[in-house]
Amino acid sequence: MSLRVASLFIASFASIAAAGPAFQNFVVQETVRVVPAGFTKVGIAPASQNINLRIALPSRDFAGLEKALFDVSTPSSSNYGNHLSKAEVNAFLAPSDVAIAAVDAWLASHNLIANRSSSVGDWLSVNVAVSKANEMLSAQYENFAHRASGKTYARTLSYSLPSEVADFVVHIHPTTTFNNPRTLRPVISAPKPGIVADATPASCATEITPACLQSLYGIPQTPATETSNSIAYANQADLRSFLKTFRPDISSLTTFTLQTLDGGSNPQQSSEAGIEANLDIQYTIGVATNVPVFFVSVGENFQDGDLGGFLDIVNFLSDEDNVPQVMTTSYGENETDMSKALAFKLCEAYAGFGARGSSILFASGDGSVEGGQPQPCIEYQAAFPAGCPFLTAVGSTHGISPETGSAFSSGGFSNYWGTPDYQADAVAAFLNAQGTTNSGLFNASGRGYPDVSAQGENVQIVSGGSKGGVEGTSCSSPIFASVIGLINDKLIAAGNPPLGFLNPWLYANPGMLNDVTKGSNPGCGAKGFTARAGWDPVTGLGTPNFAKMLAAAGL
Ligand SMILES: *[C@@H]1O[C@H](CO)[C@@H](O)[C@H](O)[C@H]1NC(C)=O
Ligand SMILES: *[C@@H]1O[C@H](CO)[C@@H](O)[C@H](O)[C@H]1NC(C)=O
Ligand SMILES: *[C@@H]1O[C@H](CO)[C@@H](O)[C@H](O)[C@H]1NC(C)=O
């Protein structure tokens, strides 16, 4: 009896010894070689400093979701418009049971039980001290000052995971991503006192108002009718300043839903917040007449570890039973400042919203081809999330005769994602027409962006009672979103599904957009890309022609 127990004991001890101690064999996951410009190392992060680790688990079947997305978004498909349910999408995006068990066991070995960030279960979070994070990830957290915002962020230049979980974690944040938390604010281009004048063709050449857009793009003034239709704005603007400034202007006919995430009511610099919120609200209510608007205000105190609100919004929307039919967001990052694994993970979530019937629009960025890099730069900078192929990136134009691509408008080619099928012919035609211009400065096999464009200069807003012009792709994205919102209203009224993920439809119907063939986005001491007939990485396929888009939507 005692002999048997002893031999059992020895046997089990031997099997543990053969496997080695659990969770001790570290595999390097991601490394940053150079601290991105704009950040300065302050010193080692104190052991007791708190850090909220966000752990991304791999999706169970992203390839399946991608196939389903194109099946419901490609006009020639027999399943076009048969959008997936929340449960169907989340079943593709949820991690496997094996991954969950492995990660939970690793966390349990550190006496941690993770919090689930959403019902999908693919993002976990644990609050730990820096000393613990260093031990768990074989990392060395340091504090880095972000000069532009004056904020300090804990990051590590490298992190590792035990071999037992390395395949079951796609990314941990914050680690190697040095994202810039304040981006794509519209810039005041021409502040002028006074009140908004009525649009005349002459004034539209220098001042863009909702009336100008109605005339230029043929957008009707007739109010939308469908209450199930909605547009969402993901925005970092301060809620209090937003309400104080804009509540008197909200049309009583407009359903306006506010959702604050993550301390969204924390005060921010009201000047910036006011302009951004003004722009978004005035150019929805002013353009997408009577389409219900849903305003997502994300605080500075991001639960998502300074991911600019990307992750909070993704997790929030993935839990909603009904996603908004259109969502427009006016901030972005340099692609190189984002971990590739993190960028892919967020992009998968946008694919999920598209499969559920939501049109996801992002401003393409305001840094031309340069992305604000210190000069001289040797390569054009791509923008995130514009480079994600499962969303619609919107660039800027100005002027009316002819409408011209804006010099600041970001456009180009991703280094992270390859050219998707839906734009392969359009991109090949551009590359062929461009010849050797810009060669060596960009990745010709990448996803090209923007997809479309809209007016983005001298866009008139009212702020604090004064009229002023603003510019930026953050003007163009809400304008394009409003057009889509109005088309969705008519589709829903006719008993049809909303447009959902737009790109396969856009590239299949290039003639429904006003092709912009003038303008360029120079940078890095080079010419940048030039707008041409057909798709180009300055203005995409072009700007909206409402009547033609309605016809292409079968209305
Ligand atoms: C989970 O969330 C709760 C409530 O926010 C928090 O108190 C707790 O520390 C979290 N757990 C971990 C492991 O981070
Ligand atoms: C991109 O990086 C540059 C520095 O190289 C920085 O100045 C700029 O703000 C960044 N742009 C964004 C959108 O984060
Ligand atoms: C260029 O883009 C392709 C396709 O996404 C990618 O595989 C490759 O790594 C990129 N090249 C560079 C130098 O980043």
Image (cartoon, helix red, strand yellow):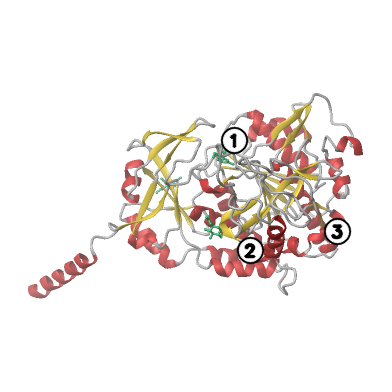
Viewer can see residue 2: yes
Q: Position of residue 393 (x, y in %)?
A: 68, 52
In the rendered view, would you say 91 is above or below 132? below
Disc sitting over residue 265 in the figure: 1
Q: Secondary structure at mark 1?
A: loop
Q: Quadrant of ligand 3?
A: bottom right
Does the residue tagged 1 have its C-beta within 8 Å of any atom of ligand 1?
no
Question: Disc 2 designates what residue?
Answer: 420
Q: Position of residue 532 (x, y in %)?
A: 76, 53
Judged by depth in the image, the label closer to the viewer, 3 or 1, is: 3
Q: Nearer the viewer, residue 523 or 243?
A: 523
Mark 1 nearby-residue class (10 Å; few <14, some 14–19, many ≥20): many
Does the residue tagged 2 have its C-beta within 8 Å of any atom of ligand 3?
no
User: Does the residue at mark 3 contact the one at mark 2 (Cβ under 8 Å)?
Assistant: no
Alpha carbon distance from label 3 to label 2: 25 Å
Instruction: Tell me the quadrant of the picture where the N terminus can be found.
Output: bottom left
Q: Position of residue 554 (x, y in %)?
A: 83, 65
Question: Disc 3 designates what residue?
Answer: 548
Mark 3 nearby-residue class (10 Å; few <14, some 14–19, many ≥20): some
Residue type, mark 1 in image: Ser
Quarter assignment of residue 346: bottom right
Residue type, mark 2 in image: Pro
Disc on the earlier residue, 3 or 2: 2
Quarter assignment of residue 67: bottom right
Residue type, mark 3 in image: Lys
Q: Position of residue 497 (x, y in %)?
A: 75, 64
Identify the residue shown where x is 88% and y is 47%.
221
Q: Secondary structure at mark 3?
A: helix
